[in-house]
Image (cartoon, grey):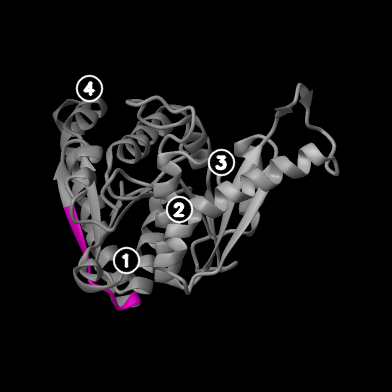
Amino acid sequence: MTDGTQSRRPVVVGADGGRTDGSAVRWAARHAQRTGRPLIVVHASEPEALAAQAVGAGATGITALLEAEKERTDAMAVEVEDLGRELGIVATLELHRGSPVRALLEHDDEAVLIVVGTGRKGALREWVLGTTSLGVAAHARCPVVIVNPEVEVGGLIHNRIGVAIDGSPDSRVAARLAVAYAAAVGTSVVAVNTWYLEVVDGYVVTEPESPEWKALVAEREAMLDEVMQPAREHHPEVEVTLEVRRGSTVQAVLEAAADWDMIVVGSRGLGGVQGRLLGSVSHRLMRQAPCPVIVAGGPRQ
């Protein structure tokens, strides 16, 4: 992730100028600083949204809305410049008219990461900004980082990256991404597989010390080892721990993530249908995670 031309690929982050995307912008800037990359902050305003706000406002109200948008973007330009100066990185602001998803995806081919917030601002605005997060995560070929407003982004606290592995092609992409990310920032990786209800020889496995339980765990550990092996060979300096947990996937990963700085997931995983935009597990983790979530992109990694 940091050699040759790769090191010049920018970190791209979406910003709406509100307070809830501050964590996403700050995380993106810290990552750019940590990995020696430039930062591009993208702000897109949709004419339809401004028009909806202007309904019934009259000429004076429309002028006030346009002036408010101008003040917001001017303030953002100053903030981005100050952020770049503070962290010693090249930081630029791009302004677009149109869809935020489209504006961010314009950087898909060049960005090393695209970073978005979730914008928990109440029912309607949460839905709108959630569409941006989901739209980018579903369609981008580069990795997409989702940072909730409550996430602490001051630095690496645990020095541990978690990756959810189920053996699917998407989770293999996630495995490579997790180890490459860990190599870039100097952390370790925990590869986690979960199971909840398994039947062996007609019996539901419930006893932790039973032969069936031990065989089940050993089988899943072997799968984890096989999936992670290519990434470990590419980055032998990264410490990788394998962990099998019993419980629902989302709950088990969220519990483990209390000691992680990042969760890495595939976009679909097992049970995902080709053409489905984003798997339910990835979607729920994006909303509930106590740390940033990286959704692995498409084939180009």
Q: CA distance from mark 2 to mark 1?
A: 14 Å
Image position, residue 168 (x, y; %): 46, 38
Residue 88 part of the magenta segment: yes
Mark 4, residues whose alpha carbon is within 10 Å: few (<14), some, or many (≥20)? few
Q: Which residue is mark 4?
A: 55
Q: CA distance from mark 1 to mark 3?
A: 28 Å
Helix, strand or loop at label 4? It is: loop
Q: Which residue is mark 1?
A: 1
Nearer to us of marks 4 and 2 is 2
Residue drawn where x is 40% and y is 63% of the image? 180
Looking at marks 1 and 4 on the same chain, the residue that comes earlier in the sequence is marked by 1
Q: CA distance from mark 4 to mark 2?
A: 49 Å
Q: Amino acid at mark 3?
A: Gln
Looking at marks 1 and 3 on the same chain, the residue that comes earlier in the sequence is marked by 1
Q: Which residue is mark 3?
A: 288
Q: Nearer the viewer, residue 39 or 126?
A: 39
Image position, residue 15 (x, y; %): 31, 50
Magenta segment boundaries in residue numbering: 87-94
